[in-house]
Amino acid sequence: MKTIFKIAWRNIWRNKRRTLITIASIMFALFFAIVMRGFQVGSYAKMKENAIESYSGYIQIHKKGYWDDKNINNIFEFDQQKINDLESDPRINVVIPRLESFALASSGDATKGVAVMGISPEKENNMTKIKSYLQKGDFINADDRSVLVAEELAKFLKININDTLVLFSSGYHGATAAGLFHVKGILKLPIPEMNRRTVYLSITEAQNFFSTGEQFTALAFDVDNLDDVNNIEQELRLSIDQDKYEVMGWEVMNKELLQMIESDNAGGLIMIAILYMVIAFGILGTVLMMTNERIREFSMMISIGMQKKKLIMVVILELIFLTILGVIAGIIISLPLMIYFFYNPIKFTGEVVEAMKDFNFEPIMPMSMDVQIFIYQAIVIMIISLIAMYYPILKILKLNIVKGLKS
């Protein structure tokens, strides 16, 4: 067996030009497949991250029926000691109370319907890193009567820090909710839709504004590990009164986003499949060339006593060596580019930005460094090469030595 390995390794370097062409074809094919898939997976991961960590959280608890009817009257009171007990679970980073509703925001002659989010500033920042989105001014604290305004909304209302924002809405059980609020900071949020229509208050001030008392619309959970979400979700369902409350995981809350990702992913996989078809024909063409050029060589080796079975093993090993070399080279040349775009994602400019915002996408294209991208693409290339091996095997099995020696 050792001899067969040596013969196969020496054979691939007898014709260096042919070998380098084969390795290069596999290398560049794998390079394009890895980079293309890296951008796709990176974009999907960014969308999920924006949806989960910028808004929904990994799990939420609501009053039963709230998700289908997001009404200020569908609120609940949750024992603070119970929240503290949940946060003592090492799998849970923080439990974030929220009070969300809608209001008319006005400044001067400009008026717009907005989403008002009452948050616990420090807890919210632990998950959403909302403080990092601050463009101007200062962040609010738990006792603040000031507001944070999303950047696009601030531009629409023509307001800046230290200006006054008027909010008017309907509070709990029809109470009038109206107030003047000092604009303390301007935020540039990563989700375009939120950046166009969101105002943040401290949860205490939001409860006063909507006259809800110490009640919430949701408790959002930041979880340490995505793999723990399902288990925590099941445990929460068992620990609460399911006639009063409902527990939702991030996949249910972001169902439309996941459906869009699945649809786009299917299109991406079709493009990858087309690329692999081109790769397959390239590899098959190389194998055909290698085999037909060596018919005389194969016939000579068999005529001097080499068994067809061993000759087939030599040819298979040659293709395996070429494929492995091509795969390694493809991964090596793709890594620098992927690392660069991982730390420096592509940022779109011009009309593309507005088009992406219309679809509620952040106008960047990040790169994923998920190791599965490399593994899956390498496996596919290996499978294509294995399929291509059937041709030289059949050619050797059906080889007519006399005709082969004359060729």
Image (cartoon, rainbow, N blue to C red):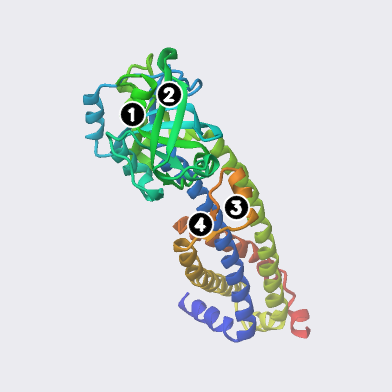
Q: Is residue 350 left or right of residue 248?
A: right
Give the residue displayed 60% in from the left and 48% down from the top.
356
Disc assigned to residue 66: none
Label 4 sits on residue: 366
Q: Are marks 2 and 1 in contact (CB under 8 Å)?
A: no
Q: Earlier in the sequence, mark 4 or mark 1?
A: 1
Judge whether residue 309 can be spotted in this image: no
- What amino acid is labelled 3 in the image? Val
Q: Earlier in the sequence, mark 1 or mark 3?
A: 1
Q: Earlier in the sequence, mark 3 or mark 4?
A: 3
Which quadrant: the C terminus?
A: bottom right
Within-10-Å neighbours for mark 1: few <14, some 14–19, many 20+:
some
Q: Is residue 117 left or right of residue 282?
A: left
Within-10-Å neighbours for mark 2: few <14, some 14–19, many 20+:
some
Label 2 sits on residue: 178
Residue nearer the viewer, 365 or 280: 365
- What amino acid is labelled 2 in the image? Ala
Q: Earlier in the sequence, mark 4 or mark 2?
A: 2
Q: Position of residue 323 (x, y in %)?
A: 56, 70
Q: Earlier in the sequence, mark 3 or mark 2?
A: 2
Between the C-alphas of marks 1 and 3, the distance is 35 Å
Disc assigned to residue 205: 1
Within-10-Å neighbours for mark 3: few <14, some 14–19, many 20+:
some
Between the C-alphas of marks 3 and 4, the distance is 15 Å
